Image: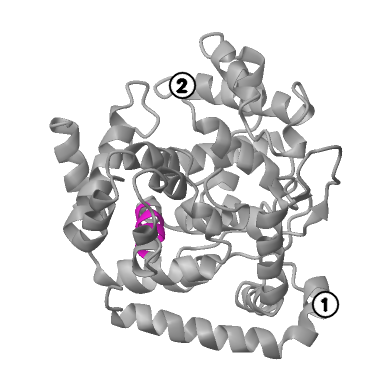
Amino acid sequence: MPRQSGAEQRMRERLAQHKREKEVGASYSAKAASVSGHAPIGMERSGNKGNQPDRSRSALGFEYTALLAGRQAEYIRSSLKYFAHRSARWKAAFPIVIPYQGGAVNTLLNLRKSAKLKRFCRKGIPTDLRPSVWMSISGASKRMHSSPGVYQKLVDKGSPEFSQQILLDMHRTFPNNCHFRPDGCVRQQQLHRLLSAYATFNPGVGYCQGMNFVCGMLLLVLNGNEEETFWLFDAMLAKMPPNMYAADMLGIQAECATFFSIMKEDYPDLSATLARRGALEVMPAIVVKWLINAYVDTVPEETVLRVWDCLLSEDWKVLYRVGLAMLLRAHRSGELETHDAASVLEFLSNIGWSTFDANELFETAYDDIDAKGTVNRARINKLREQHRKNPS
């Protein structure tokens, strides 16, 4: 097994300490669940009809198989004390933030960027505060209230050019989420209006697959408030890598090539292992999905939201760091070595679904990758430009 780095050893020690804290706080869990406002997902049984697999449903309506649901529920139960602690810290540090009231953000909230706010966002925004914080730190709330009536005018105008393509993607959007079923349901209608409005609002981008997943997740988090979702979606796309959703796909291809350039230069052992397992040929399709979906439909929903906490408070660098972190953790644990060419594609396609504990993932993304200082904006911009000029 590869020798552990100092950061990896520190990560293991901190996780061990955290585990001991979880055990000590086990009796506290029930109380913490009721007061934290931060517990990310509450599992509900969805029943077992006929020969259908037993499934559980998350707070945002996503269904998991019994195996994944069990692992997710165990993570939640063991982490309630942590969630309560973070919620208390947030509310003490930023008392102006009030819980989201089901479709009405605190319009007076104006969180100024600071090292403290960035640190708190990296450790996770409490669930009940997240919509208000996102709307503030992204600038979406300010834009929405300076543009009264704009969204409705865009909805009324529609997007004849993209309407049919968007409609075709509706049934592909979150087929395992009860809020997006059956076809033609309220959430699908809302998402169609949102994406059509955005295509009209930003004709230079229009509509591209992947946008439906990003916008759909925002719609769920904002409890179906369309206008808030529209402006937050616009703010979020501004945080994504440039030309990510260009119709010619050259933008996402350049991002993917940039990702691999960094991986090969910074982590040659990881690259060599992927090459030996015959994985480098299949990795581009996997990385494209990670980036263009901003990790929606590739990792558990709470992990997606934690990634977006950083994306909206900082920028797109987190997308690179999280992808590299997932691969590094699989490499350092020896998991990659257990797969041959026949099984490595399935393993890598589903690698994100094991990242229930976002804290572990972020230990690698920030205490290791970010600490090296090499996955930075200047370097990524330079590599991106090289790949755009000379696409492989």
Can you give x and y, in whole percent of width and height, for residue 286 in the image?
A: 40, 41
Q: Which residue is mark 1?
A: 30
Q: Give whichever of 191, 114 is nearer the camera.
A: 191
Taking 28 as reference, is 258 left or right?
left
Q: Quadrant of residue 369?
A: bottom left
- Pinpoint residue 217: horizontal percent, then vertical percent: 62, 42
* Mark 1 Cα shell of 10 Å, populated few (<14), some (14-19), many (≥20): few
* Image quadrant occupied by the N terminus: bottom left
User: Would residue 253 be visible to someone looking at this image?
Assistant: yes
Q: Earlier in the sequence, mark 1 or mark 2?
A: 1
Residue at the (50%, 56%) spot, across then down: 307
Residue 132 is at least partly visible in this image: no
Q: Amino acid at mark 2?
A: Gly
Q: Is residue 159 left or right of residue 369?
A: right
Which residue is at a point 72% across and 48% down the rendered structure image? 60
Picture quarter with the C terminus: top left
Q: Which residues are magenta?
A: 320-328
Disc 2 residue crowd, few under 14, some 14–19, many 20+, Cα 10 Å: many
Amino acid type of the residue tagged 1 in the rendering: Ala
Which numbered marker is on residue 206? Answer: 2
Q: Give the residue at x 56% y 67%.
A: 357
Q: In what element is the residue under mark 1? A: helix
User: Does the magenta-highlighted stretch encompass residue 326?
Assistant: yes
Q: Which mark is residue 94?
A: none
Q: Is residue 245 magenta?
A: no
142, 242: nearer the viewer: 242
Could you give the CA–CA distance between mark 1 and mark 2, rounded to whole angstroms?
Answer: 47 Å
